[in-house]
Image: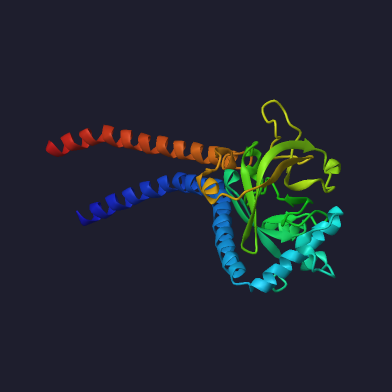
Amino acid sequence: MAGRDAHNATSKNGRRRRLSPPVLLIALGIIMCMAPIATDLFFRIASRNEVNSMSSTAEAVDSAEKQQLLAQARAYNARLGGYEDPEAAGVTEILPYNSQLSVDGSEIMGWIEIPRADVVMKVYHGIGEPALSAGVGHQPETSLPVGGARSHCYLTGHSGLQQHRIFDGIRALEEGDVFAIHILGDAYAYRVTSWEIVDPTEVDVTPQDGDMCTLVTCTTTPDKWNPKGRIGINDKRLLVHGVRCEYDPEEFEQTKPDVSAYVNDNTRPALIGTGLLVAFAAILALGKYVHTKRRAPLGHHGAQR
């Protein structure tokens, strides 16, 4: 009897081992599909934590130092736009670009908040690859994000990165939506007025009358199904223009992310793949359950006899 029981246990374990490879393959497939979404989630959580830490650091900056940094930035914008700014009247020598809005030599000048696109990320000096891989970059030849009579700030972010989303979601922005740049504890809010798709060589960064900010990302040639282009061959640039407005914390809190900030050309394949694998796993489980139920009565009657 002991030998028979051992044989039966071995047979059952063998059947379990034969069932394991499909289960493992399905699990591996789900993990591979969900990896980009998981890394993006981790990146966004880390970015928000860094922004919270940076906000605390900004609040701790001495008031005199803060006013000096802001006056320098306003003077920088005034020189770029060709106008006089009374808020920068005391500045006699304008610091170089990389020193502007830099606390303790940091390459981070602030952070951006775009509720409709679910973006809370640091803003770096320049648009080099290290900056654009870590967050949003400020185009050096444009106004700094502190406003001015003829200031136009350009902020650039990648689209279509496999490991995380940066500016993928700005395709959801429409006229009336808001975004804000936070500098040294102050919020500079902008309301979207328009958007356009242009060739990379047609991006005009010339300062204009007014206080404006433009968000820039790569996109494809638009079609009737994708008026703002797709995430793919980045032969075009999507520009989302905003004009300065009052910062209303309640409006930012109440604005919910658009679904396209999560489901787009970059994440859709992973979500579809995961769904198919889960459906396949459910079919296998259902088949096994039905097979077991069909065999159970035979075994039960046999035991009674």
Residue under the image location 62 percent in, 44 percent down: 178
Q: Is residue 19 above or below residue 280?
A: below
Residue under the image location 71 percent in, 40 percent down: 232
123 vs 292, nearest the viewer = 123
300 vs 289, nearest the viewer = 289
Number of on-image labels: 0
Q: Is residue 55 above or below residue 279?
A: below
Q: Is residue 63 above or below residue 197?
A: below
Q: Quadrant of residue 196?
A: top right
Residue under the image location 76 percent in, 54 percent down: 148
Residue 181 position within the rendered picture, expressed as x and y whole percent measured from the top left: 65, 54
Residue 238 position within the rendered picture, expressed as x and y whole percent measured from the top left: 74, 40
Q: Is residue 139 left or right of residue 193?
A: right
Residue 305 position within the rendered picture, expressed as x and y whole percent measured from the top left: 12, 36
Can see residue 102? no
Scheme of colours in the image: rainbow
Q: Is residue 85 left or right of residue 254?
A: right
Q: Is residue 7 left or right of residue 107?
A: left
Q: Is residue 170 left or right of residue 81?
A: left
Please identify the residue farthest to the left as the structure is shown: 305
162 vs 209, nearest the viewer = 209
Residue 150 position within the rendered picture, expressed as x and y whole percent measured from the top left: 80, 50
Can see residue 28? yes
